[in-house]
Amino acid sequence: MSTGYIVFETGEIFEGEWIGAEVETSGEVVFNTGMTGYQEMITDPSYKGQILTYSYPLIGNYGANGIDNESGSPSVQGVLTGESCLDYCHFEAVGGFSDYLQQHGVPGLTGVDTRAVVKAVRSRPTVRAVITKNPDTVSFEETEFPDGESLVPSVSVSEPHHTSGGSPHVVLMDYGHKHSIYHALIDAGCSVTVMPYNSSAEAVRGVNPDGVLFSNGPGDPMDLEEQFENIRSITKDYPSLGICLGHQLIALAYGASSEKMLFGHRGSNHPVKYLPDGSVHMTSQNHGYVISENSLDSTPFQPTFINVNDKSVEGMKHKELPVETVQFHPEAHPGPSDTHFIFQSFIEALTTGGRKPCTTASL
Amino acid sequence: MPKRMDIEKILVVGSGPIIIGQAAEFDYAGTQACQALKEEGYTVILTNSNPATIMTDETTADRVYIEPLTKEFIASIIRRERPDGIIATLGGQTGLNLVMELYDSGLLEEMNIELLGTRMDAIKKAEDREAFRSLMHELKEPVAESDIIHSVEEAEAFVSQIGYPVIVRPAYTLGGTGGGMADSEAELRDITASGLDASPVNQCLVEKSIAGFKEIEYEVMRDKKDQAIVVCNMENIDPVGIHTGDSIVTAPSQTLTDTEYQLLRNASLRIIRALGIEGGCNVQCAIDPDSEQYYIIEVNPRVSRSSALASKATGYPIAKLSAKIAAGYTLDELTNPITKTTSAAFEPSLDYVVTKWPRFPFDKFDSANRKLGSQMKATGEVMALGRTLLESLLKAVRSAEIDCFHLLPPEALFGEELKEKILAQDDERLLYVAEGLRQGVSPEEIHLWTGIDYFYLWELERMVDIEKALRDKTRLVEAKKEGFTTKAVSWFSGIPEKELEVIYSENNVRPVFKMVDTCAGESASSTPYFYSTYEEENEASPSGKKSILVLGSGPIRIGQGIEFDYATVHTVRAIRDAGYEAIVINNNPETVSTDFELSDRLYFEPLTEEDVLHVVENEKPEGVFVQFGGQTALNLAARLEQEGIPILGTTQKQLDTCEDRDKFEAAMNKHGIPQPPGKTIFSTSEAMKTAADIGYPVLLRPSYVLGGRAMQIIYHPDELLDYMEKAVKVSRDHPVLIDRYITGQEMEVDAVCDGETVVIPGIMEHIERAGVHSGDSTAVYPPQHASEKLKQKVIDYTIRLAEGLDVRGLMNIQFVASGEELYVIEVNPRSSRTVPFLSKMTGMNMAQAAAKAVLGQSLASQGYTTGCLPEPDDVAVKVPVFSFRKLRSVDITLGPEMKSTGEVLGRDKTFEKALYKGLTAAGMTVPETGNVLFTIADCDKQEALRHARRFHSLGFGIYATPGTAAFFENNGLPAVTIYKLGEKSPDLLQVIKEGTCGMIINTLEPGGRPARDGFRIRREAVERGIVCHTSLDTTGALLQVMESRQFALEPVRGKAGVLQ
């Protein structure tokens, strides 16, 4: 194995051993504090354009399997680990972690002081960096970073894709959805049409859904400004659920504003409080942007969930329409499924056709 | 919802003495809980019988009752204190059972006392096997099916429903004899038949076997709003089949996918919600390595050993938050005490690997069966943190103080022998697993033998690869980064440690220290809780303030128990009071000293020279205290001094004087203090000659040992020869001490000295005569027998020794008095087992006074003058507690080798009342009627006769073995003859099994090998909970108690001749 480096735009350099594909890469450095689910994380399209740091130091222990992918292939630009386990052992495993990275052209560094990386990342809103073999030759002026506006298009389907199940029929607006969202709908008996991120309201009406789910996805929600009007139009017509980026897009479509967080929420242990009854739930999260709380005042939305630690907006509902959104990931994978009821109540609302608030299901 | 305002006074029930399965973790839990409740403004009443705890310090609770943990005593405390609430879930199984008893008796309802935290119906549902099983069925949570059967046919019928393999466990047999695993119908028939035969009640439990499954634990918390979280999950390296307390455990789980992790997490949370737990709870699961099939093994509805481990592993204080939840708070209303900025309603995220390694007492009990199974045998444990599994595991093994600086086996075994050793499933298994890999046994084979997951075996294989490279003198630097000690690198490479140190220093190979912060670095925190690793960023930059280092005492083991943690904690407090920063190095997750809130900086590290020096290099403390951490810390003193680190208090030179027999003898002569004649010897021939010179009996002990290991009284030259050849490895480096053994009254003092003043808080007398290890003796304060003159002599010698040896800090001296002659038998210039006991009884906090004195605040300025503190009006008795029921095939005979695991305190106005309390607290039921069985060595018969007469006049029937019975009869005392095993009816085993005798007095021929009969009798007594004394002194004291509790029944003008 050869030595590699990650060079931060801010000057820090961390050394490690190269794993995965032998290609240099660049991107925004983020970290996830989950202790399990490394395969789910790298295949989550929301990480498109980012270099993912695993704060848990041992990665690859149970290999890579054919079950846990959240999309067709890894979305990350690269990974940083403390130790990448070469020998894996699990009855479902089909290969090793590093091999898996290599197969999919993803580079990574192992043997990195990931805790030091996390601490360097958490102190600034955006840390861009380059994974390279020659740290001396890195020039940030010349480095190409993934273009924000291309992120969602690169992970969204280009054509609608329909799966016939039962009723209700849900359109999944795909900004780079995680398979677990799709499976949550299918497992509940829904028919699902996955539609490209830029599908028009007419196109959505054309498939005649009972409801629409706006998926997660990568990047700055403002990069999709062009879609806001469409989104507003769809949510006026259909009961809607927004997850993560989908949540942000709906908020922005109604006039709220977003901001980049200091270091985002990425992990499996984020407590959110459901405001109507004050109950706290553990959630899986992965976002770097957040809806500014005060900006909701001028919209027809009211917050439903807030983050217990930093009090940021974690969910909202429309005051009149059956539109609800969450910033976290009720589909879990990785992480706790404590908020799976969000899906149940969304689907229930579709089948009863009513305007039942989504989140009063059994907690 | 804020805290409860309708309650004011809360009773917290502790867990009693340290026994196997219930160690220091409840001192940590109880101390945290009391502090948590006090800071909320509640009046906290604490009751616990164990004086060697921080929780029983007067400052921990508003009122502390050190009383026996029995229903009767607690009921009196309740009637007197009238608390509004009681907490059952912080005092281990003992506390839980006790509160259940109180609840069932109706007292809590009668007194209108609310059970706080988890409610009784939840506790009962979790504790009652059937109720739990039906709840699991209701929740559709799988449990391993089991049934009680009375015939082979029943067994077959049951197994036809659940399938093979099954485990057959005969009921009520010694050590589970007759049981086993059945994989087929033929095996089932065989095993069940022999099991039923072995079982006295003709019944067996047949259980679906899940041996080989991964064993996973979840530490969970829930509040009254039904909010539930997982604090930590843990995975046993040893698969199901070995008690989790005896298993090597990692945190977080290492081999589970996220799906599996969440599967078990969800199950755990469903269960605690269904139970309605309010506070901490432990859920044990098993998961098939080859599918997602899982089983729930057990739920503990209380804080536990695992929750202490999880608290230290994550930084999340479970007991503290459980107490707050019991007081009415919900998780979201509480702050994470580590970050101080985030909520307690969250799940800690680790960015390191934790390994727990259990510590066993087999070094004390050669005869004990080392095989591990469902009965826990470990007395304590250590925890280690690292950034890789290997680093963490290697730290753990060297923390355990089992003479391992690496995963190396104690013995060289090969081929079949090695295989058998690995298959034996004992405490040394992993050491031999590593050795197997080293010798080329394939991981596949080892997996087949042990069921240990390949992940762990491959990590070990990686270690072995590095070892191989080291033999070629390559990968020297990499080895360090993988967690090898320099000593291990030197061992494999043959390069001297000094040379390696130069190489490492030139290459800048040194550890950095990382912080434990519950959140994997996500939020900034300033927790002063660190572990070492070989990475880039050091998070423990020295504060610049003057600091003092305190070395802790490592794992709880026989001979070095919680007492030393008690002293460590008080030293830390004294250091902080004196204006220094207190830095602690320790590795025991169960203790108060490793609570990160105690010290200014906590380093969770092995207590080895190398690891300690790394911390020293980082912190550069003003000095180090070694005298409070027991032998563990003392063993490091010499090296620390060599490195130029000032040892605070008594100097290394003086420590050495006390350990080195010849120097000690010279010092004793110089100060005119008599000691039993003796000598240090370096060979067997020297031993024979010395013994002949000083005369038998002699006492032998290897130098530099803990708790009298391998210590023995020897009566004949033949025995001496035998001992020298088998029991010790005598050499130039490992001399043996040989002393004349003096029979007499043993006395003990602890003293505090600062070079000017010598304070003796009190003198203790032992009930058992010299020869029984002081840790196993019943100690009485103040003395009941010693004359004023003798006591004066004790004081005088103590002062002379303290001054003569220039002791600065604590010292402990043991004396033996033969008549009015007083000999010193041992001087330990350090904290001792009796420091907490004496501190509590005399009101002098010895550890704090000593630490302050050493740091410059003289004893005089603390208000003390030289001499002994005045004796109190009441009497206190410290009674040892043994864990014999957990350690099958261990002989319970007391001798110079320490065997007790814990102690309790009895205190009252008279000696008899105090001893009664002590014995009761130690778990002994003092019988009021019944029969007493005597089986007595010839030399003790006269003395035993006196005791037998006293029993007789108390109305007890006297049973005795033929020789003893004849002796009693000849002396006019009626006795029923009980025959030796298999001789004639009634035999010994019969009367024990049938329960016709309630107490056994059994003494051994001096020096005689324990007869098989005697051993069998003593073990049977232990198994059946029958009081068995092997010391006539203990019996005499017990008689005194019994006599004091009964009215004398003397006929009018009784014939004095009969009773004498």
Image: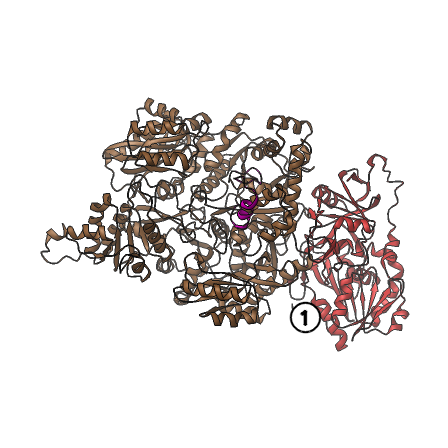
Chain colours: A red, B brown
- Picture mark count: 1
Residue interval drawn in magenta: B403-428
Majority secondary structure of magenta residues: loop
Image spot of residue B484 (x, y percent): 62, 37
Task: Answer yes or no: is residue B674 visible.
Answer: no
Image spot of residue B291 (x, y percent): 66, 61
Q: Chain of mark 1?
A: A
In magenta segment, residue B92 = no
In magenta segment, residue B416 = yes
Q: Identify the image quadrant of the N terminus of chain B.
A: bottom right
Give, as a three-letter code, the residue at label 1: Ala
Above/below status of B356 relative to A228: above
Of B739 and B912, the residue lying toward us: B739
Above/below status of B971 relative to B201: above
Task: Answer yes or no: is residue B962 visible.
Answer: yes
| Left or right for B847, reference A147 | left
Helix, strand or loop at label 1? It is loop
Residue B106 placement: quadrant: bottom left
* Residue located 23% across and 45% down the image: B938
Image spot of residue B732 (x, y percent): 45, 26
Image spot of residue B57 (x, y percent): 43, 46
Residue B75 placement: quadrant: bottom left
| Left or right for A232, reference B515 | right
Of B334 and A283, the residue lying toward us: A283
Q: Which residue is mark 1?
A: A361
How many residues crowd around disc 1 within 10 Å: few (fewer than 14), some, or many (20 or more)? some
Of B627 and B968, the residue lying toward us: B968
| Left or right for B777, reference B435 | left
